[in-house]
Image (cartoon, grey):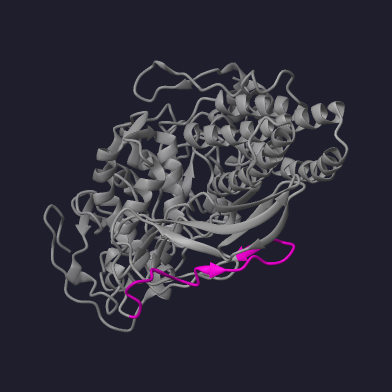
Amino acid sequence: EQITNIQTSMLGPNQTQVPPSHFILDDELREIYEKHCCNDYCNDFEQLPDINNNQTWEQPSLHAPQEYISQPSPQHQFDQQILSHILQQPINTTYHHTSITDLHINSLYTQPTYYAQQHPSQFHPSNVQPLSTSPLQSPQTVSPQLTNTPMSNANSTTPSTPTHFPSPPPFHVATDPTSQYLAEVGSSLEQHRDTVEGFIPRQKALISAPTQEVFAQLEEEERRLRTTVEWQLQNISNLLSQTLVLPSNLCHCYSLRSELEIILRQVELLQMELAQLAGRSPPQALVALVIIKQPFPTVSSRTDTLQEEQLVVKLLTGSTVEVRSSSGVRASLLTEGPLSSCKASAEKPLEGDLQNVEGPSRLAKFPLCFLKGTRKTTVAIRFGVEVEVEQLGRVLRATIESDSSLPFVVMTNQKQWEACEATLLRKEAFGDRLEVPWFQFANALQRQFLRATRQDPEKSHRCLSNNDFEYIHQKFFYGRQFVNQKNFESLWMWYGKCLQVIRYQRHMGALWLAGYLAGFMTREEVNLALLGQEPGTFLIRFSERHAGQIGIAYTILDSEPTIKHYLVMPNDTAAAKVTLADFCRDKSQFVYLLQFVGVQEGSILVKKHLKHSALEPYYSKRDSLQVSSGSGYDPL
């Protein structure tokens, strides 16, 4: 009510809507927003919503097992507090919340738009047009007289000022609790490493002069550190399966998980060493081989060579272990089926697969070259080494193997890319299970999309938006809480071909990143975007019924304003000779292009450009071919 009163006080004489100058709320309104929405507001929510119905979805326990820990450490207490705060928030499963309070609640994914953060000047209210209406005004009740007026200057690229705006949230966004938690886990990594480094000399001294008191103290400290690391790993898994994670946080999750697993393996070696010292465990070599860097999951091409720093393994040992000798570390390919042969080397799938362990660092770097394709199936790499070690007064010989790498696929030609990506995404999202939580699948899909569109996962320019996820979730998975592999196949038949276009068709990747290819929208959303726009305004998107093809919606002035939809046919864009930009250039029906800017609080934001100013960098010098109509679409 306070917010409504302040908005009403902003209105001038004869005004019925908040003027565009107040699109970004003033300090007083933001203070009220933060007071009611950004403090402990979300702590009132204790369960996640079931996206099928009103039943509640029980969240898994975030507490460390009682048998591992009796009194949580400060780090444990912080983890419990923050993770409970994150996972007790209502998760945005419909993606169309429009009230101001929802901005913080959905801040696990929702932000002022990723594009707006990269280009703040373009997010000014005079340049951005929200398409959806406020909760009090449905699309059916919006009068055409309240939409944008025609441009006064045809040579200007600045759109007219909208006379209707939904009630917008403040541009300020509260601190993302997911980011806060991951930052805390990241800062604890250095403490974990220092703690492990401190264990090693103390454990050496204990073995030289054993005492019950020091033994019990070290054993307890190592147990507590192991419990902390295991708990943090479990919390990261909970985040990935129960929340929609921002792309930068998604990258951070996987990086932290890898670092924590390495620390956990070192702690396990130290615990095994104490167990052998106490006679509770039979003698075995206290050596482990761990992967500390890898470029997977990915789809590689045959004959691709990894850079030296991309794939690195490390030899870990107990505190008193001396490695007397070791063979080279060998990389082996793990596959479920036969490989396609390379003529130059029909019997060897990898080149550069044997590397020596380097000095004190105990690192081995692998600039692997793939000599065979994997026939559209996923494979992994496992490393092995033979060592002779001296430990606790014994000399032992052993063959040590690492865990397998993350999965990858090696294709032999570009035509296999779509099928290879489908195989890899299925393995990454589902593993050996038939169904997984929607959020787990969505996070895997986001990671795969950034990889397919060649974007830096830490600084993505245009990732899948909330609107894209809603479209996929509702159209292919029917809004269900769990998704299965059968529905995934249905999704990929359409989505995979769209990705193929973005990745390989000339300029399409650039058009996507620039927002000139709007992407995944229903016909109803497109019609709403063009509602009230002047004749000649058009929007480019993927066709819903024709996988991998482009649909162009545009306005014309008939007896009354009309919206038409045209399906771009294969002979409209002749491969590299005539691009989609060329096709649009040569059609007089297309004058003003709507650029997708992002999604904020359920509103799709667009910006209007003269088509030549937007598409000129993508024009070629050749003329486009004559067009033909498509089934169900209007001819030009």
332 in magenta: no
Q: Which residues are magenta?
A: 344-364
Residue at the spot 71% in from the left edge and 27% down from the top edge: 76
Q: Quadrant of residue 309?
A: bottom right
Which image quarter holds the N terminus?
A: top right
Residue at the spot 70% in from the left edge and 36% down from the top edge: 276
- Between 66 and 21, the one lying in front of the other is 66
Q: Quadrant of residue 206?
A: top right
Across and down, in percent, residue 448 comes to: 42, 52
Across and down, in percent, residue 403 comes to: 51, 49
348 in magenta: yes
Which image quarter holds the C terminus?
A: bottom left
- Between 141 and 523, the one lying in front of the other is 523
> Would residue 586 be found to the left or right of residue 443 on screen?
left
Across and down, in percent, residue 379 comes to: 38, 56
Residue 126, can we see it? Answer: no
Residue 415, can we see it? Answer: yes
Residue 191, placed above or below residue 387: above
> Would residue 304 be found to the left or right of residue 238 on screen?
left
> Across the whole image, how many numbered discs are drawn on residues?
0
> Would residue 335 be found to the left or right of residue 354 on screen?
left
